[in-house]
Image (cartoon, rainbow, N blue to C red):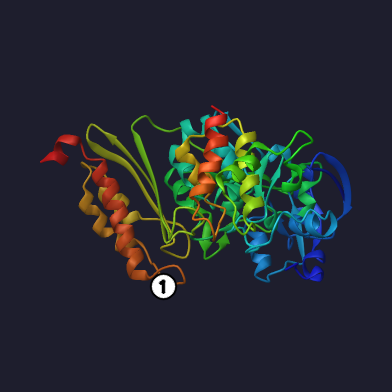
Amino acid sequence: MTKPEGSYASVGVHTAYDLEQALDFRAQYPEARVLAGGTDLMVEMDLGHIPQSVLNIWPIGELRGIRERPDGLWIGALTTHRELVESLLAEAWAPALIESCRTVGAVQIQNRGTLGGNIANASPAGDTLPVLLALDADVEVASAARGVRSVPMEYLYRGYRAMNIEPDELIIGVRLPEPHSADQTHYRKVGTRLAQAISKVVFGGRVRIVDGVVVESRVAFGSVAATPIRCRGVEEALLGRAVDPQVARLVADDIAPIDDIRSTSGYRGRVAENILRSWLTSLLPAQEEDV
Amino acid sequence: MKIAFQLNGQACEHEVSGMTRLLDLLREECLATGAKEGCGEGECGACTVMIDDRAVCACLVPAIQVAGAEVTTVEGLASTEGLHAIQQAFIDHGAAQCGICTPGFLLMAASMCASSEPVEAGDVREALAGNLCRCTGYQKIVEAVVEVVVNDKA
């Protein structure tokens, strides 16, 4: 059962011990695959996709941690899903994000997989990605040549597994804006089983309801298009009036699900609509629900 | 690249090439064969070990990443004072059959003992969701883990 020595052992490894060194390596070896916790890369390798070289950023302490800053909550790219699940600070700021971290793989995977890695893997099925979209997260990227810049989550992905990030740039963290007291958020994942399964449909939502009227809305799905996406038509239809669960019907116009190994286009469309309707219904004032 | 780490409380040093997996380093070089290879892709938990008291799949960890860390395998659970409480509980509850998954379950449970996070009985199945067993039907394993991780810790 041992892996063929040649392939794994032959990979060139550049290990960075601080951010400056990582960015220098990134500029010098832009083709090297970035290695964080390894939970995606090692599976790819098991399937026979062996990179020529990797940039191991795991030892970089300054990319770990969860901190309140004047501009929001900063989560270091190497913060693991489990560290987020255990963080009272993250729970207070972004309970839906914590819910999503709890559904990544199983505990063994959560202990190793990182938030930055989930973003950089750029899977349309990434569990945390619709929530990050719904929360208007910014992704911080850095390069040796141009310093740090922020990429809004909604502009991060430009196609299937493709990001608007330059080859010399590295994802260093995520910034979440301060939550509004009138915001309600929701996370939902539908997969074959609760643990380990990759999602068939994954959802992150946020609405701000003031005096019974929706004044801001975010509806984001994963596994229903080439990238995690926001559903603009649904978002706009929700605005300016009381929550209307019937708006869920419009979701089909915003998504482009496909048939693949995990599910079918038709099932995904139906489930996306049902998830959305069930969440919107849960937001209705209790007395209206009773009627 | 030469890496130094603690394995089951003993300092050790090994030469590691490229992306060699921790699982292969443990089994082939350290002769700690308690960690088993099942799926090789982080689904089954048979290769679960602890790194700094956290449970991980050794098949998904590049060996270079344990430099400076403390690694625990099933060989390190018992001490001169006797078995680890979770090992005794597995015996008492008859929680092992063929044994292939057992080291992984023991390390997962041991990491729950080591954690300061409170564990309730309802959390145990969720915590064990990354370990597969084809023999027991899980009930006896869950009972053994609840006894040690929930009842004894409380």
Any part of residue A171 in sight = no
* Circle 1: residue type: Asp
Which chain does tag 1 point to? A
User: Residue at the left extreme?
Assistant: A291
Viewer-closest of A37 and A219: A37
Rendered location of residue A111, percent (x, y)? 62, 45
**Residue A291 % position (x, y):** 10, 41
Q: Which residue is mark 1?
A: A259
Label 1 packing within 10 angstroms: few (<14), some (14-19), many (20+)? few
Image quadrant where residue B70 sits: top right
Q: Position of residue A67 (x, y in %)?
A: 59, 31
Q: Is residue B24 above or below residue A78?
A: below
Locate residue A155 relative to residue A4 in the image: left or right.
left
| Residue A54 drawn above or below residue A138 | below
For label 1, the SS is loop
Q: Is residue A10 left or right of residue A111?
A: right
Q: Nearer the viewer, residue A289 or B98?
A: B98
Q: Residue A72: x percent and y percent?
A: 52, 33
Which residue is depicted at the point 60% across and 51% down?
A: A109
Up-down: is B40 above or below A216?
Answer: below
